[in-house]
Image (spheres, helix red, strand yellow):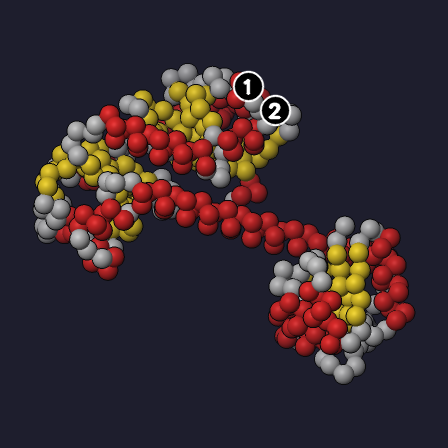
Amino acid sequence: MAKILMFSQDLELVENITRSLKNEGHSVSWCSKPAEIEPVARDGEHDLAFIDVHTRDVQHDKIAEVIRYVMPDAEIVLITSYAFPYVTKRDMDNVTSFLVQPLTDEKIKNVVNRALRQVRIARENRRLLSNVTTAKKQWEATVDAIDDPIFLTDFEYNILRANLMTYRRLGKGIDKVLGGKCYEVFHCAKRPPANCPGKRVMDSAKMAGDVIQFDGLGERLACDVYPQVFAGGGLVHHLHAPAISYETQTELMTTYERVFDESLVPMLLIDIEDYKIIDANRRALEFFAREPGMIFNVSLSSLFVPLLSGQAISSLMEKFRDQGGGFRSRVVDGHGKEKNVHIIANIVNVRNLRLGAVLVIPDQLL
């Protein structure tokens, strides 16, 4: 059921549309004077607004402006007629649909259903944007909480992002770090060091590490570099003491597990030897509608539609050999419901184990 606001000074038109809308289970609020629009519009969250073009005292486009201001998320439908054959550019700024007279119940129903679909799509897009923004903030806050310098470069050694500890250890502000060459900022050199692990990653597309002197930091540190699969690619650098203590390993693992479990995307960890699932985050359990006991230590192939499972496992093996990548497939949840998804696979190292990380992204999130 939708909540609909109608502005018209034609009582017969209002009665006909209201009857048709209420027969479909919708709630209708009506006003006929410009001064009534704002208080009525603010009285609850309306999904749609109908505006009759034939108004006195004020132009219909001015009414649309007021409704758009008060109800920014609502769809606006303009009630017009064959005697009103043109649409001005001002109308198109606020109006998203048109109801053309003479009216029939079927015509009203179709216009309302189309407009409500747009409302649902717009609200879902805003929800997804909010979720993505929240996840981004959570991730940045988590990375900033890590006590080691972590920074991201492109394949030309330009620094794209860095956590707070990077700036603190360098003693430099954002303007002195971002956009600079990592070998200039961290090594005070005109070219990368001979044993640069970043260069090895670019050559092999595999994680590399080495212990290097960082003159910009005034100390010798271990530098682990990982290829970044997402956002156009790049290199993730993690600087830390050459020998990581057990306490540090435990802290980093705890951070990893928190980010893994709070992810807004279903994520699985699998054993790349036998493709059995060894971990799944909360979002994956919800998406696949399975209890932990029904997903842990089972074959990953059982999650795919049977006719596609062999092809999906072959694609995963290929992506793991290529150090990451994605493909489309179809999975089935615990209720037997099939879902179209995009699979992103990557190799990760967890507690010295080489595992496969599998992100299962529903089509509606893309």
- Is there any visible trace of residue 80 in the rendered image? no
Q: Residue beneath label 2, please?
A: 334
Residue lying at 85% horizontally and 55% vertically, measured from the top left: 22
Where does residue 289 sit, x and y in percent of width and height? 59, 27
Mark 1 or 2 closer to N-term? 1
Above or below for 44 versus 308: below
Residue at left offset 24%, top offset 40%? 148
The quarter of the picture where residue 234 lies is: top left
Horizontal arrangement in the rendering, residue 219 relative to residue 355 (left or right): left
Near mark 1 (Cα within 10 A), the count class, few <14, some 14-19 or many ≥20, is: few
Return the residue at label 1.
Answer: 294
For the point 31% across and 43% down, the residue is 145
Q: Residue at x 17, y 53 (%)?
A: 171
Judge by depth and name the residue closer to the eye, 170 or 49: 170
Q: Position of residue 168 (x, y in %)?
A: 21, 50
Dot 1 falls on a residue whose secondary structure is helix
Q: Relative to residue 313, is residue 283 depicted above or below?
A: below
Residue 98 position in % (x across, y down): 74, 65
For the residue pair 190 and 298, the one nearer the viewer reads as 298
Viewer-side residue, 98 vs 66: 66
Residue 140 as seen in the image, left or right of residue 39: left
> Which amino acid is tagged 2?
Gly
Q: Nearer the viewer, residue 296 or 250?
A: 250
Q: What is the number of the mark on residue 344?
A: none
Task: Please indicate whether residue 126 sits to the left or right of residue 254 in the image.
Answer: right
- Secondary structure under the numbered disc 2 in the rendered image: loop
Amino acid carrying mark 1 in the image: Met
User: Is 235 placed above or below 67 here?
Assistant: above
**Quarter where residue 174 is shown:** bottom left
Is residue 32 in view?
yes
Dot 1 and dot 2 residues touching (CB under 8 Å): yes
